[in-house]
Image: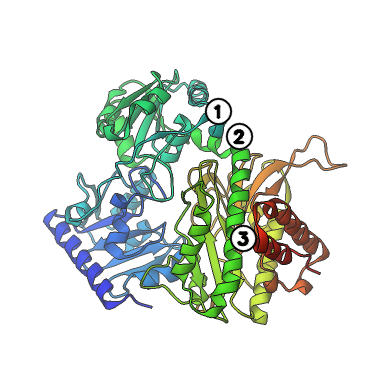
Amino acid sequence: MTQPNSRAALHAARLAALRGRLSADALDGFVLPLTDEHMSEYVGGYAQRLAWLTGFEGSAGSAAVLADRAAIFTDGRYTLQVREQVSPLDWDYVDVPQDSLAAWLGRAAEAGQRIGYDPWLHTRDQVEAMRAALAERGAALVAVADNPIDAIWTDRPAPSPAKMVRYDEDLAGRSSAAKRADIADWLGERRADAVVLTALDSIAWALNVRGADVAHTPVALSYAIVDADGTTDLFVAPEKVDDALRQHLGNAVRIHDRTAFAAALGGYAGRRIAADPERAVAAIFDALEAGGATVLALRDPVVLAKALKNPAEVAGHRAASVRDGAALTRFLRWVETECPKGGETELSAAARLLAFREETGLLRDTSFDTISATGAHGASPHYRVDDESNARIVPGQLYLVDSGGQYADGTTDVTRVVPIGVPSAEMRDRFTRVLKAHIAVATAIFPDGTTGAQIDAFARRPLWEAGLDFAHGTGHGIGSYLSVHEGPQRIAMPTYAGGGTLEPLRAGMMLSNEPGYYKAGEYGIRIENLLLVVPRAIEGGDPDRRMLAFETLTFAPIERDLIDPALLTAPELSWLNAYHAEVVARIGPVLDGEDRAWLASKCSPVT
């Protein structure tokens, strides 16, 4: 399916303008990722260069532009979406990780060509892979001082002016001073003088601050350098700082203009400075080395600490989950009642869900753009509805809604599927197999040290046995009033994009559990709850072997009209009924009248 002609023409004109700019800059091509100078997954409007150029609105991808051809690179989550949003007349579609941007450049570039890249938008490993591939062709990779997209994007939004604000210690569970002391200890163990923090959620967590610079993710554009004594240099735009923030940060945090960061990297001659090769861009490594620093390529020490939720963060998430589950339950009843009438659309449904969440009085934002997808749109795992794609919700379809809320005490993410009218036997079969996959993960017991890649197979077996599969990971980490996607833990096969699958799961980590099934052109199914990794004592087990399990954190009914009980084993039925009983116990008291009665009916035992 191609774009409407007007939209295709708009992006074709932008591609032509870029090629004109490249020619003026004596470049034969340019590579462009979907990220910002912090290697963020979700980026502010000012950094949405890939969407502006191509029309692609997914959350992961990249592009390469040469004089006579261009390619866009996406993973299996966006196979359908990229074809709907990006014109095949101008762009080749390249699937990753089966192929890569570097490998494509190595095939497409010609000897003597100069391919540009922005060193503030790529990691050093990415740069070296592209450089090596181009060298094989006799071509060169060239760093640009000014991004050519910015030169032609005349109405490019300015970065957000929103304030950086304090995050209460009662919700954070630990003071910023204690967190920075841990970072100092980490530096001491590695004989390092300082560490550069570039990931926005790492800075937010370490300093107990939040912001509003990225849609759906409460972070502020900034950099931080933490010294071995725990004192910190914070680089942030002056207009984001007020007296309340200065008082919160204290004298141990020195505040500088964000524009001073690049120059500051040159002031560490003779010192050992740590930087994360996955989260710090190539320009940072280049500047540190040019200034005479010895750079230690080490993972950001906040990454794992942030993933291991403390009691206050877990308690906050539990409260947010009940609040959010009640809002979702009210919405699911609304869908069942109103959508079969044929007057609702994907956009109107998303607006109604937002209204239910807003009625809690505590919603700060959604945690991502709600995936409100009916019929064939549900087969695109990361479908994003807009005015052009908005479809009417009508009988005979499955309606999939993947959504979440940002509350001061927690970040939520949950997916449910509702039949509009009577579902087909195939829909019930596929849904039940996805449910079996979901239960297999939810009930898994595993030794400490098990990786997400190993757990992923638990989810796929019920689908594999029927010759089915899904082309995305089974689970991602999640933050505490931070990013809805948080590493380092994931539940995914190593072949799927995103990495992190070899990270051992540890008690205190939170992850999603979201297996699915997608039938192109017809429907999509996904069942998603959030999980907490917890210790599990096994009676009679080896006392020296620490075992772990998952505790389900999300509570909302799973559609009983889509379940074929004959496909469920007795233990699976037991889990489903116990889960629904807990949904009623936790969510029921928050609901009133007809909503509570509907929930009780939806959660009655399945036999």
Q: Is residue 76 visible?
A: no
Q: How would you rate the neighbour count of disc 1 (Cα within 10 Å): few for under 14, some for 14-19, many for 20 or more?
A: some
Residue 228, located in which quarter of the rendered image?
top left
- Residue type indicated by callout 3: Thr
Confirm or deny contact between disc 1 and disc 2 (CB under 8 A). Answer: yes
Measuring from the top left, give residue 415's x and y in whole percent. 58, 61
**Residue placed most toward the observer, 444 or 493:** 444
Measuring from the top left, give residue 321's x and y in whole percent. 61, 49
Q: Would you name the residue on which mark 2 appears?
A: 312
- Residue type indicated by callout 1: Arg
- Counting residues from the N terminus, which is met first, the one under dot 1 or under dot 2? 1
Mark pair 3, 2: CA separation: 26 Å
Measuring from the top left, give residue 337's x and y in whole percent. 59, 73
Find the residue positioned furthest to the right. 540
Which numbered marker is on residue 327? none
- Counting residues from the N terminus, which is met first, the one under dot 3 or under dot 2? 2
Q: Would you name the residue on which mark 3 appears?
A: 329
Which of the two marks, 3 or 2, is nearer to us in this view?
3
Mark pair 3, 1: CA separation: 33 Å
- Counting residues from the N terminus, which is met first, the one under dot 3 or under dot 1? 1
Mark pair 1, 2: CA separation: 9 Å
- Is disc 2 placed on a helix, strand or loop? helix
Q: Is residue 248 left or right of residue 316?
A: left
Q: Residue at x 48, y 58 (%)?
A: 354
Q: Is residue 209 left or right of residue 157?
A: right
Q: How would you rate the neighbour count of disc 2 (Cα within 10 Å): few for under 14, some for 14-19, many for 20 or more?
A: some
Q: Would you name the residue on which mark 1 appears?
A: 174
- Residue type indicated by callout 2: Ala
**Residue placed most toward the observer, 538 or 590:** 590
The quarter in which the C terminus is drawn is bottom right
